[in-house]
Image (cartoon, grey):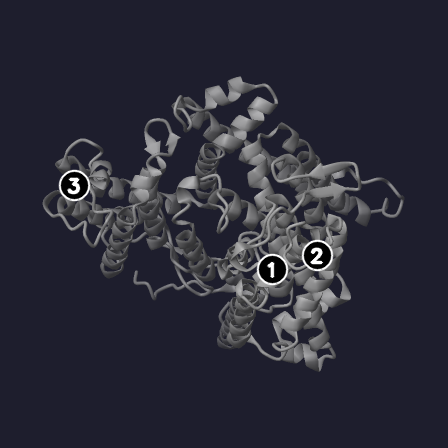
């Protein structure tokens, strides 16, 4: 049977599974092209120095380090991508099998041949002058500290094995694939969070747990890695069972409410009251946020405080970019306004005048100045859209930084030397928050994060929030429907500026000094990456994006859990941004409305195909009835 015979209809947009294809029925051009791209990627990763730098970080002691993982993950991803087939309504969906495993194995082997080229090249040629990472250290990692021939032959074999595993995931089905990915991510997360888990175990006086989990150097032990993977699988199975149980309970309640007992005022069980579930989740999360810092060490609390500062910035930018759809690349200007306003008003070392007012009084002034800065930046660009708007806001952000550096304003802001000796935060005479007390700084940041989350949530569901989202979808249509687009966009700038000033004010008191280089344009770019990666327009997504990116990789000038990524984090930010735009443009935890906006063309196409299929079926039935066929 050929592909064109017995083609299934698109009734209900469900493609039918055709016969299995032969093992050698491959798209060889696609496999070789994908393998060649993979080889270039592997060579780039190796020559960038990642394997050598990351090899110091053990994940599973002693068999897997972060350096070797940097050479293994890409063949898995590319080989799995090779086996993906986009099946739209009306297309034939072929059954998965050994063909996909062979395709993955070929792609992985061809891609890892690039590492074989490196092993042979480093052995026989010395070109360290242009390529500084063309080194014996890299050769030692590629040959597993054994022999050149072992390294030359084993990497294609590793690529074939990982590619076959990636291809087998298509065969295994979506549930097993998802379980495998969650299991691997849980093991990786447990290894990355070693310092946090060690801090918690010491705080709760259960050091035996961290001693059992982690080896004498670092990284999970064999047994611990297996147990963590098993716990992840069991937890996922339990979560699925709980969801099924909740669904059955909700269906029973709906049937009961539709029956004779409807309106009797009988209380619904817990699983039937979804708002109650959310309320319980919020209460438990808040309790954990309040209690856990008491049991964490200084380094972890410092890390979380930095994450909280970026959450504040991301929530402010989310209003401008995520809700109103205004691409602002100069958001760091509001961050600088908040930091320098508090520094000038509270520090005794302020150059021109030093009123030394309390921090909360200075914060109020900083909010007013940030709001005025939002109007100053927003008013000239209010009629611009798209790339023009992005370039102009980028210019305004740089103007603020250059003004802080200029000799013209050095009498007020002290130029490149900045303002130092900024006091801590006096909390109504009850306590003082200082930078050398990370726990108190973290609690202060959490309070302002809670305020920002509440304000963002209320605005999102308000009249002005709906106006912002209408402007984001189509500004011309929103204006035609009576939305005052000028006032709404200015309100977005002002609100985002005020939330950004919170972070700048806390930073100045936390560090005790402010300098112009702390407000470089790269800060705006990183915050934008956080918002896009987490999910524009969605508060939980923005928070998750800040926790993942800033907590693990670190900010522009702040370390993360993986300090080995310090010199590569900008590269990783760019790669993540490209991947998100191509594969998941709605973000890690997307807003439902935003996801529908981004995929409206696909939804319309599927609806058109369903209508065409229904029309074809109707015409076929009519023709058979006219011919007298059953």
Q: Is residue 317 visible?
A: no
- In the picture, measured across the screen, residue 115 lies left or right of residue 597, that is left
Q: Quadrant of residue 481?
A: bottom right
Q: Is residue 445 visible?
A: yes
Between circles 1 and 2, the one closer to the viewer is 1
List the residue tagged with mark 3.
152
Label 1 or label 2, whichever comes before in sequence order: 1
Q: Secondary structure beneath disc 1? A: helix
Between circles 1 and 3, the one closer to the viewer is 1
Q: Position of residue 532 (x, y in %)?
A: 53, 58
Query: Rounded to the nearest whole Å, what is the CA distance between mark 1 and mark 2?
Result: 32 Å
Q: Position of residue 392 (x, y in %)?
A: 54, 74
Q: Are marks 1 and 3 in contact (CB under 8 Å)?
A: no
Q: Secondary structure beneath disc 2? A: helix
As drawn, which residue projects farthest toward the right? 264
Label 2 or label 3, whichever comes before in sequence order: 3
Residue at the image point whose x is 40% and y is 24% from the top: 221
Mark 1 neighbour density, 10 Å: few (under 14) some (14–19) many (20 or more): many
List the residue tagged with mark 2.
456
List the residue tagged with mark 1.
413
Q: Position of residue 593 (x, y in %)?
A: 63, 62
Q: Quadrant of residue 288?
A: top right
As drawn, which residue projects farthest toward the left? 124
Residue at the image point whose x is 31% and y is 47% from the top: 75
Residue at the image point whose x is 50% and y is 31% from the top: 195
Mark 3 neighbour density, 10 Å: few (under 14) some (14–19) many (20 or more): many
Label 1 or label 3, whichever comes before in sequence order: 3
- Identify which residue, 563 or 180, lies in the foreground: 563
């Amino acid at each position: 049977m050929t592909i064109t015979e017995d083609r299934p209809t698109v009734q209900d947009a469900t493609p039918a599974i055709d016969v299995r294809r032969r093992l050698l029925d491959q798209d060889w051009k696609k496999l070789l092209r994908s393998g060649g791209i993979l080889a270039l990627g592997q060579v780039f990763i190796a020559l960038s120095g990642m394997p050598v730098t990351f090899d110091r970080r053990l994940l599973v002691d002693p068999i897997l380090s972060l350096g070797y993982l940097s050479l293994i993950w890409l063949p898995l991803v590319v080989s799995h991508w090779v086996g993906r087939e986009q099946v739209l309504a009306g297309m034939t969906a072929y059954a998965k099998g050994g063909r996909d495993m062979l395709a993955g194995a070929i792609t992985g082997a061809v891609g890892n041949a690039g590492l074989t080229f490196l092993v042979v090249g480093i052995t026989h040629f010395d070109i360290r002058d242009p390529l500084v990472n063309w080194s014996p250290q890299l050769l030692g990692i590629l040959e597993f500290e054994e022999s050149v021939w072992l390294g030359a032959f084993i990497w294609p074999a590793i690529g074939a094995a990982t590619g076959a595993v990636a291809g087998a995931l298509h065969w295994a089905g979506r549930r097993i694939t998802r379980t495998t990915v969650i299991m691997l991510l849980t093991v990786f997360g447990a290894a990355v969070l070693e310092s946090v888990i060690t801090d918690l175990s010491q705080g709760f006086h259960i050091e035996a747990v961290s001693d059992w989990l982690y080896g004498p150097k670092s990284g999970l032990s064999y047994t611990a890695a297996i147990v963590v993977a098993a716990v992840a699988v069991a937890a996922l199975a339990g979560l699925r069972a709980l969801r099924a149980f909740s669904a059955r309970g909700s269906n029973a309640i709906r049937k009961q409410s539709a029956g004779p007992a409807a309106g009797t005022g009988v209380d619904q069980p817990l699983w039937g009251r979804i708002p109650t579930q959310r309320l319980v989740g919020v209460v438990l999360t808040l309790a954990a946020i309040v209690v856990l810092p008491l049991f964490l060490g200084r380094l972890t609390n410092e890390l979380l405080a930095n994450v909280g500062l970026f959450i504040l910035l991301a929530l402010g930018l989310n209003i401008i970019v995520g809700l109103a759809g205004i691409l602002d690349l100069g958001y760091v200007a509001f961050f600088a306004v908040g930091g320098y306003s508090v520094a000038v008003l509270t520090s005794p070392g302020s150059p021109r005048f030093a009123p030394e007012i309390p921090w909360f009084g200075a914060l109020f002034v900083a909010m007013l100045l940030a709001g005025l800065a939002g109007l100053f930046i927003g008013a000239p660009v209010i009629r611009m859209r798209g790339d023009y708007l992005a370039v102009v806001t980028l210019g305004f952000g740089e103007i603020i930084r250059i003004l802080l550096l200029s000799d013209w304003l050095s009498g007020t802001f002290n130029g490149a030397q900045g303002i130092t000796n900024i006091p801590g935060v006096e909390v109504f005479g009850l306590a003082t928050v200082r930078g050398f007390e990370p726990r108190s700084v973290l609690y202060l940041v959490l309070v302002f994060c809670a305020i920002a989350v509440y304000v963002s949530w209320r605005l999102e569901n308000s009249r002005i929030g709906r106006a912002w989202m209408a402007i984001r979808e189509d500004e011309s249509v929103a204006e035609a429907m009576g939305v005052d687009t000028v006032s709404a966009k200015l309100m977005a700038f002002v609100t985002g500026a005020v939330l950004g000033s919170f972070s700048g004010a806390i930073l100045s008191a936390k560090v005790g000094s402010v300098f112009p280089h702390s407000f470089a344009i790269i800060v705006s770019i990183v915050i934008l990456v956080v918002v896009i990666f987490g999910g524009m327009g969605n508060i939980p997504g923005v928070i998750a994006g800040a926790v993942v990116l800033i907590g693990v990789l670190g900010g522009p000038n702040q370390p993360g859990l993986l300090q080995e990524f310090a010199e590569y984090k900008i590269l990783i930010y760019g790669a993540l941004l490209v991947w998100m735009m191509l594969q998941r443009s709605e973000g890690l935890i997307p807003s439902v409305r935003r996801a529908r906006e981004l995929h409206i063309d696909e939804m319309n196409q599927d609806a058109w195909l369903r209508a065409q299929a229904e029309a074809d079926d109707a015409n076929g039935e009519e023709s058979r009835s006219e011919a007298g066929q059953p």
